[in-house]
Image: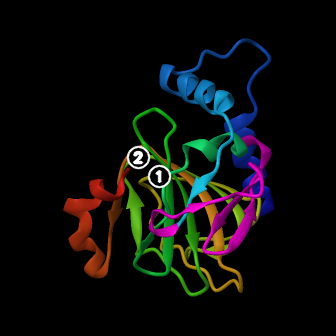
């Protein structure tokens, strides 16, 4: 698994030595991320929570250390909201079209089977999860697209926290969740 993560990271982040021209949206997003001030966050139910530092985020008394490259997002993180399947998400405003979220899956939590209309990038910040394709651990970087169908779930004792960026809504592929497809844009914020 680590070889696959290394290979994907090399593909995504190993640029040639010559100047790389970024897509306008990506350039704007990176500029926004690197210029955001650190601030306190908002907890479940809209209650203001004091964060010990910009290096951490808190959810219902659990404190997670976030990587330095994501610490600038603290002031752009919205309210945590509970979803079905022992899931919580906090949207992050990156100032471009698409959706970025911190997502927490409690032990026994899961996301219904789905594929992607566009591309999803996910960084595992804390914990572990499996999706029927692979098992991912803290530090793993994942790229999913329409060629992948998966159902993330965790049985890890402390759950799993990820940072995820999507450019299109999910497309649910099985069970009752398929009925949500016409409304999937509602979860894409």
Front residue of 2/57: it is 57
Q: Is residue 188 above or below residue 132?
A: above
| Label 1 crowd bin: few (<14), some (14–19), many (20+), radius 10 Å | some
- Residue matched to label 1: 145
User: Is residue 174 shown to the viewer in this render?
Assistant: yes
Query: 58 or 112, which lies in front?
Result: 58
Locate residue 33, reporting x and y percent: 63, 33
Span highlighted in magenta in the image: 44-69
Count neighbours of disc 2 (C-alpha within 10 A) and say few if under 14, some if 14 to 19, many if 20 or more. some
Is disc 1 in contact with disc 2, using a CB cutoff of under 8 Å?
yes
> In the image, is residue 41 above or below residue 26?
below
Secondary structure type for disc 2: loop
Specify whether 76 is left or right of 1. left
Residue 122, given in percent of the width and then of the height, sits at: 60, 55
> Which mark, by number, is residue 40?
none
Q: How many marks?
A: 2
* 129 drawn magenta: no
Task: Name the colouring of the figure.
Answer: rainbow
Image quadrant occupied by the N terminus? bottom right
Q: Is residue 64 magenta?
A: yes
Please give the name of the residue rendered at 55% of the width and 49% of the height, measured from the top-left corner: 77
> Which residue shows up at 42% across the image and 41% down it?
98
Question: Quarter of the image holding residue 108?
Answer: bottom right
Query: How far across and how far down the image is residue 31, in percent?
Result: 62, 24
Q: Nearer the viewer, residue 70 or 121?
A: 70
Residue 118: numbered disc: 2
Q: Looking at the image, which residue sits at the far top? A: 19
Residue 62 drawn at (x, y percent):
69, 73
Say whether disc 1 or disc 2 marks the residue closer to the N-terminus.
Answer: 2
Determine whether the residue tagged by mark 1 lies in a helix, strand or loop. loop
């Amino acid at each position: 698994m680590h070889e696959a993560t290394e290979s994907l990271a090399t593909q995504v982040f190993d640029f040639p030595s010559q100047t790389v021209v970024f897509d306008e949206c990506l350039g704007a997003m990176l500029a926004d991320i690197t210029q955001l001030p650190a601030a306190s966050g908002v907890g479940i139910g809209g209650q203001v929570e004091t964060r010990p530092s910009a290096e951490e985020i808190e959810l219902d008394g659990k404190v997670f250390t976030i990587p330095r490259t994501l610490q600038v997002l603290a002031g752009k993180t919205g309210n945590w909201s509970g979803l079905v399947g022992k899931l919580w998400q906090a949207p992050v405003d990156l100032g471009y079209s698409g959706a970025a979220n911190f997502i927490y899956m409690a032990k026994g939590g899961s996301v219904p089977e789905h594929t992607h209309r566009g591309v999803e990038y996910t960084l595992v910040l804390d914990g572990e999860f499996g999706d029927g394709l692979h098992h991912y651990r803290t530090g793993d970087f994942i790229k999913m697209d329409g060629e992948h169908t998966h159902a993330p779930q965790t049985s890890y004792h402390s759950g799993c926290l990820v940072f995820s960026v999507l450019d299109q809504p999910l497309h649910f592929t099985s069970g009752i969740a398929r009925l949500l497809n016409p409304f999937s844009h509602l979860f894409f914020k």
